[in-house]
């Protein structure tokens, strides 16, 4: 049941992400909403469900996007695994807002860099690492990071709603047994 709810969440976020891509088409901003539940799940350190989220989110974005197939899949799985390792190794308490924002920002940067690297090295790469000048790429990256952090808050509330729904459904399932 948990994976069905995760898949529905990913489909909802994909539809919002497609509309956001249409709205920001002529701007340098690229917001990726599907990476946020992957980050939230990896930072929570409860189980390995972040791998399922990374796989399905990356797969949906690879089907939807124009980057070489596997770009988002590999970058999400590798980035989420590194983030989960860092959260387990360096953070032992429950995350408060500031470290959570720091983990989210660092994961957005890491996954953004991994996506650019995988798009360049995978076969049939549609674009190279340096399509724009460094200053243009830097400001595009900064703007995308800012908008990604702004989008993280509503996506986090949606993520918490899905997590509470999973807990309720699993509790009902245990009562029925």
Image (cartoon, rainbow, N blue to C red):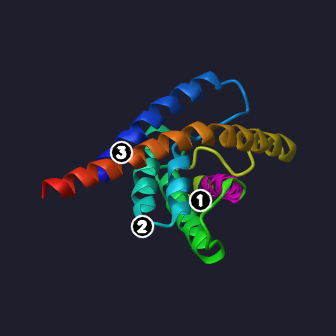
Which residue is found at the position 71% from the left and 40% from the top?
144
Check disc 3 and report its element: helix, strand or loop. Answer: helix
Task: Report the residue marked by disc 2.
Answer: 47
Q: Which residue is painted at 68% across and 53% down in the image?
A: 97
The spot of residue 92 in percent (x, y) is: 61, 74
Foreground: disc 3 or disc 1:
3
Mark positioned earlier in the residue sequence (1 or 2): 2
Q: How far across and down, in percent of the image, does residue 18 sit?
A: 51, 30
**Disc 3 target residue:** 165
Report the Cα–Cα distance between label 1 and label 2: 31 Å
Question: Visible in this render: residue 31?
Answer: no
Disc 3/disc 1 C-alpha distance (Å):
40 Å
As drawn, is 1 to the left or to the right of 40?
left
Residue indicated by mark 1: 121
Q: Which residues are magenta?
A: 99-116
Dot 1: element? helix
Q: Position of residue 75 (x, y in %)?
A: 55, 58
Q: Is disc 2 surrounded by few (<14), some (14 to 19) or many (20+) residues within 10 Å?
A: few
Q: Which mark is residue 110?
A: none
Q: Residue at x 51, y 44 (%)?
A: 34
Query: Can you tell which of label 1 and label 2 is closer to the viewer?
Result: 2
User: Which one is nearer the viewer's eye here, 165 or 36?
Assistant: 165
Q: Quadrant of residue 83?
A: bottom right
* Res 25 → quadrant: top right
Q: Earlier in the sequence, mark 3 or mark 2?
A: 2
Query: Do residues under tags 3 and 2 come within 8 Å of each other at their CB atoms?
Result: no
Residue 2 as seen in the image, left or right of residue 82: left
Q: Is residue 115 left or right of residue 106?
A: left
């Amino acid at each position: 049941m948990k994976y069905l709810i995760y898949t529905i969440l990913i489909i909802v976020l994909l539809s919002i992400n497609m509309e956001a891509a249409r709205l920001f088409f002529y701007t340098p901003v690229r917001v990726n909403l599907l990476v946020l539940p992957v980050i939230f799940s990896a930072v929570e350190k409860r189980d390995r469900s972040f791998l399922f989220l990374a796989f399905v989110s990356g797969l949906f974005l690879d089907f939807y996007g124009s980057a070489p197939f596997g770009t988002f899949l590999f970058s999400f799985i590798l980035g989420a695994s590194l983030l989960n390792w860092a959260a387990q190794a360096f953070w032992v308490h429950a995350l408060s807002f500031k470290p959570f924002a720091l983990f989210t920002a660092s994961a957005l940067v890491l996954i953004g860099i991994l996506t650019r690297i995988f798009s360049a090295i995978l076969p049939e790469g549609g674009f190279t690492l340096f399509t724009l000048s460094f200053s243009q790429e830097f400001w595009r990256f900064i703007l995308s990071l800012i908008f990604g952090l702004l989008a993280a808050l509503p996506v986090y509330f949606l993520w918490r709603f899905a997590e509470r729904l999973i807990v309720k459904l699993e509790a009902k399932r245990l009562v029925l047994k």
